[in-house]
Amino acid sequence: MKTIILRKGKEESLGRFHPWIFSGAIHHTEGDKLEEGDIVEVLSSDGRFLAIGHWQIGSIAVRVLTFHRQPINQAFWQKRLAAALDVRRAIGVAEREDNDIFRLVHGEGDNLPGLVIDVYGSTAVMQAHSVGMHVCRHELAQALKEVMGENLKSIYYKSETTLPFKAQLGQENGFLYKEAIGEEIVNSKSSNSKCDDVARENGLKFHIDWLKGQKTGFFVDQRDNRSLVEHYAKGRKVLNMFCYTGGFSVYAMRGGAELVHSVDSSAKAVELVDANIELNFPGDNRHEAFAEDAFKFLEQMQEKYDLIILDPPAFAKHKDALRNALRGYTKLNCKAFEMIQPGGILFTFSCSQAVNKDQFRMAVFTAAAMAKRKVRILHQLHQPADHPVNIYHPEGEYLKGLVLYVE
Ligand code: SAH
């Protein structure tokens, strides 16, 4: 196996089981020339075995797969995937009649750095964020079939936008496996494929468009927070900003909201919300969707809402964008505080990994003060249990939310 030798003293974070090795920690490599995605063995400066991981060019040079000497093969993947499925059973999201949408693999949180797998009914959508996972995709698909058994009818691979551009992998999205045809299809083009599957989350139905939708097709990470919206929705006038597929809206409808308005700047998203509402509440005219910019909508809105959800896209994708992102959160929340009815409830989120819980809370605090409203924190929210955080990898915590009572 190709070997990486660390600089003296650079093994410390691995001793704490942190799964990343930064390029600056590497002293030299031994063996054949490294290719991106290679599986490498990592040794300390005095030759001690430390870990095995995937190598690629970039600031995170190695993503650790194991801290033990063992072969990385299909049996290895199978064991990791089976462990991930066990966790989902323990949480109570897998193998349920009324819920077949869940995240099976959440990267480092499941000791599989660089890999995400979301399950929608009998389809698994696999996404590689590292070249190594891309290289292993067929082994992974095979292992996934073994672990999921007959519950799995297809595996769609969707990594066109998540793999490092510079690695020039020429990757196309496509099915890795499809039962209907009964054979593996290597990187088949997806453009002619139809994708109109309905899957269930807590008994509610959703069209999932993993072919053209954002991320793997659905924001699985808001499930628990949607349930909380349902709990508060009764008799309220609900505004769901940045609604995408309308997850929060569908739950608010079931919760007995008086009316629900969904807003997204994408016309495609608005079509999806309408379809999902129709799927669950055919002919129910409590709901209306608007294809509009969020800030513009808040400026011009006519209705008086008393439950507002703000779930914007990540304002900061990197640390350097942090200050602007915080200003963005303050501006958005301030507008919501100004507009919400007395006794209203605001659900406000940030999914920017670069913004931590305290910074987000400070941005919302500033917004409340600017709007001069009396505000209580009712709940502090985070990502659900099927998006677990590896205790040795705090960077895995990304979703933060506050539920606020605005007097
Ligand atoms: N709340 C959603 C996920 C939101 S993703 C859910 O539960 O599934 C963020 C969404 O914000 C995307 O659909 C994107 O189209 C939308 N968006 C981005 N910028 C926007 C803007 N300025 N105004 C309105 N919507 C915007």
Image: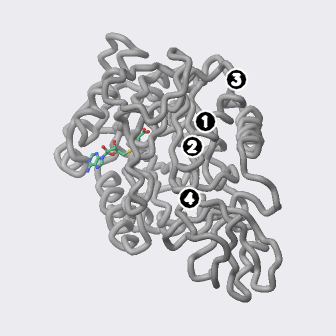
Task: Give the CA separation, mark 3 to mark 4.
Answer: 28 Å
Q: Label 3 belongs to which residue?
A: 149
Instruction: Identify which residue, 104 or 60, lies in the foreground.
Output: 60
1 over 88 or under it: above or below: below
Residue 23 badge: none
Task: From the image, state whether disc 3 or disc 1 is nearer to you.
Answer: 1
What residue is rendered at 23% in x and 51% in y? Answer: 295
**x then y, percent, for residue 12:** 75, 80
387 over 231 or under it: above or below: below
Residue 37 badge: 4
What residue is rendered at 28% in x and 40% in y? Answer: 264
Task: Give the CA separation, mark 3 to mark 2.
Answer: 18 Å
Q: Are marks 1 and 2 in contact (CB under 8 Å)?
A: yes
Task: From the image, state whether disc 3 or disc 4 is nearer to you.
Answer: 4
Residue 141 badge: 1
Quarter of the rendering occupied by the N terminus: bottom right
* Among the two numbered marks 2 and 4 on one chain, the one whose residue lies closer to the N terminus: 4
* Badge 2 amino acid: Arg
Label 4 near ligand 1 (CB < 8 Å) = no
Q: In this view, does 96 lie to the left or right of 178?
A: right
Q: Residues within 10 Å of mark 3 (few under 14, many from 20)?
A: few
Q: Label 2 belongs to which residue?
A: 137
Residue 246 in sight in this render = no
Task: Give the CA separation, mark 1 to mark 4.
Answer: 17 Å
Q: Do the residues labelled 3 and 4 touch (CB within 8 Å)?
A: no
